[in-house]
Image (cartoon, grey):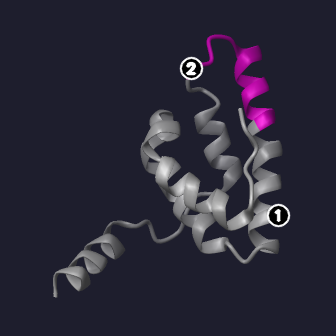
Amino acid sequence: MKPLLALFVVTLVACKSPPSIDDLCERVATCGASTPVEEEGVLNECLSEGDFIAERAFESDCEGELDDYLCCIDEAECDWWFDCEEERDEFSYCIGELPLD
């Protein structure tokens, strides 16, 4: 009974619809950027990588793992790199690779 309850709780906590990659990139680009030029560079890199991972998720039938990863980033915001390690690893395993920074 406990595993079923845990699954129910996890289901309630998960976001229903992840934000778009574009929206996430715009928010995350401000994390740690000290100048508008740095922010623009981070934004452009994020958008490019976002296109790559969205395409790979579709090709690899990993949309669920992508949604979990995006939901985590949405909740973690600037702490996403550390807070979303598990989701990132699961998504990376599903698609076969992620761009490395």
Q: Amino acid at mark 2?
A: Gly
Residue at mark 1: 55
Quadrant containing the C terminus is top right
N-term mark: 2 or 1: 2
- Residue 2: say if magenta: no
Q: Position of residue 92 (x, y in %)?
A: 66, 57
Of residues 101 and 18, the one nearer the viewer is 101
Q: Please name which of the two marks, 2 or 1, marks the residue nearer to the observer.
A: 1
Q: Residue at x 53, y 38 (%)?
A: 81
Q: In the picture shown, does residue 67 fall above or below 39?
A: below
Q: Is residue 70 visible?
A: no
Choose top left, top right, bottom left or bottom right for residue 28: top right
- C-alpha separation, residue under disc 2 versus residue under disc 1: 27 Å
Marking on residue 32: 2
- Packing grade of label 1 (10 A; few <14, some 14-19, many >=20) is some
Q: Residues within 10 Å of mark 2 (few under 14, many from 20)?
A: few
At numbered mark 1, what does the secondary structure look like: helix, strand or loop?
helix
Image: magenta residue range = 32-45
